[in-house]
Image: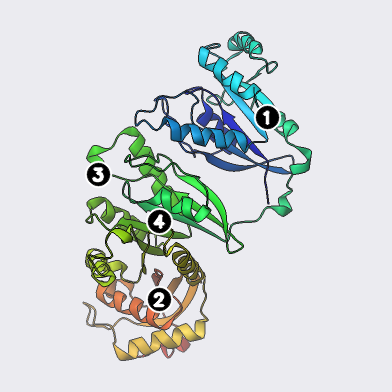
Amino acid sequence: MSLPQVSIVGRPNVGKSSIFNWLAGKRLAIVDDMAGVTRDRMTHLLEEKGRYFEIVDTGGIGINDVDELDEEIEMQIELGIQGADVLMFVVDARDGITSLDRVVAKRLRATDKPVLLVANKCDGENWEAQASEFFALGFGQPLVCSAKNNRRKSDLTESVHELLPEDRGVSPDEIEDPDMKFVVVGRRNVGKSTFINTLAEADRMIVSEVAGTTRDSVDVRFELDSRTMVAIDTPGLRKAKSRTDIDFYGAHRTHRSIRHADIVLMMFDCTQRMSKVDRKLCNYIEQNYKPCVFVVNKWDQMAEHMTTSRWADYIHDNFPSMACCPIAFVTAQTGQNCKRLMNHAQMLFKQSRARVSTPRLNRIVKEALTRHPPPMASNKRRPKIFYASQIGISPPTIMLKCSNPDAFSKTYRRYLLGVLRDHLEFSEVPIRMVLESRRATESEEELLQY
C-alpha cells in the first residue's frame, strides 16, 4: 500500500518540526531553538476528510551541521522531496524573505510537484500583512498560520487535502495496523540505525561514526515476509552528567518508545564493556514488563576472540533478573542473523499475547504450592492462595487471590514466577503477578489446599 506523502521543507528554524507536531497532535519531533536539530526524516499518518496520508518532517535546507553531517542530512531531505506528492514550503513570517528562502524556492520550482507555501509564526493579524511579501517566491499567496498559537490549523489541513492526488487516496478500511512494533535501544554507536536500514533495505536513517547522530525516535514502516512491521530507532543514550538539552529530549523519547513498543531489542556493541547507561536502560525495560531480546552487534569483529557462550554469561551476570530474555548475535552491517533475530522477536510477541485457561493455571499453582508451601507469616499462620486466573496480556498478567499478600516474600514470589514460566507459554517474556487479598468462601478453601 502506497500512501500519499506531504513533505515539510524549508530552511532551518522556520518551525517545520513545530508544524509537524502540531498536525500530528502530539510531540513527536524535537523542537529546540538550536538550528539543525532535525536530521532524519520523521513520518506520521494523518487523516483528513476520510483520506489518509503521511506527513514527513525533514532537516533544514542549507544547514551547516555541527558534526559535519551536511551531506547525509541533504540526502535525507532529497529523499523526502523525491518521495513527496505534495511539498509544504515553510517560511518564517517574522524574518521575511531571506536569501536561503530564495534558494529553497528555486530548488522546489525545479520539481513537478504541487507546493503549498506556508508562512509560520503569524501569531497575530499584524503579521499577516507582512507575510504577503512571500508572494514574490512564485508559489502564490502564502497560507498564514501559527503552530505555536494554534492559528489556522483547519485551513492548513484543508489546503493539503485539496492538493493530494486523486488516484492515491487511501480509505480508512485500507489502513492496516502493523503486525508488530519494536524499538531498538542502546548506547551511542552500537549500530541501531544500521540495523534498521538493513531490515528496511533502504537508507532510512543517517548512519555515521559520529556519536549521537540520531536525535529523535523515528518510526520506520517496512515489510518482512509479507508482514508489516514498525521499527522505532532511538537516540543513543549517555551518562546523565554529559547530557545536553537534546540528549534529555532523546532520553525522554526513548523511554516513551519503550512503553509503546511490543518488543524491545536491547543492543550492545560486543567490542565494548557494559556501562551504567546499559544497566539503567535494562532496568527501565524490566520495570515496564517489556519482552526483550539482548542483541549483541558487530559480532564479526569478536567471533575469533570470544565464544557466544562467554558473552551470554557476561550478560546474565550483569542482568540476572532478566535471565529469561533470549540473546542474539548479529552483524547489522552485513545483515548476518538479522532475519533470524526478527523471527525470534515475533515468537516473543506471540508469547506475550498468549492466554491460558483458568483450570490449567490453577492446577499448576496448586502443584507448586504442594511441592513447596509458602513459609509461615509473622502471625504464625501460613498464607493461603484461593485461586489464580489470567487477567491480561502484553504482559501476561496473573492474578492470585490470597489471604494475606504481604506474607508472601520476594523469594517465594520469584519461585511462583519460575514455576509459571516453566509450565506455561511464557518462557521468554516477563510475567506480571498480582496478589490480591480477599476472604475465602467455603468452596474456595478446598481449591488450593496444601
Mark closest to the chain's N terminus, 3 or 4: 3
> Eyeballing the image, is 30 above or below 336?
above
Mark closest to the chain's N terminus, 1 or 4: 1
> Eyeballing the image, is 382 above or below 256?
below
Residue at 65% in and 56% down: 176
Q: What residue is shown with label 2?
A: 427
Asked if residue 265 shows in the view, the reply is: yes
Q: CA distance from mark 2 to mark 4?
A: 27 Å
Q: CA distance from mark 2 to mark 1?
A: 50 Å
Q: CA distance from mark 1 to mark 4?
A: 43 Å
Residue type pointed to by label 3: Lys
Q: Secondary structure at mark 1?
A: helix
- The x, y position of residue 79, in whole percent, is 56, 37
Residue type pointed to by label 2: Ser
Q: Secondary structure at mark 3?
A: loop
Q: Foreground: 395 or 266?
A: 266
Q: Is residue 410 left or right of residue 394?
A: left
Q: What residue is shown with label 3?
A: 239
Which circle, 3 or 4, is nearer the viewer? 4
Q: What residue is shown with label 1?
A: 154
Q: CA distance from mark 3 to mark 1?
A: 42 Å
Instruction: Report if the CB atoms under discs 1 and 4 are less than 8 Å apart.
Output: no
Q: Secondary structure at mark 4?
A: loop
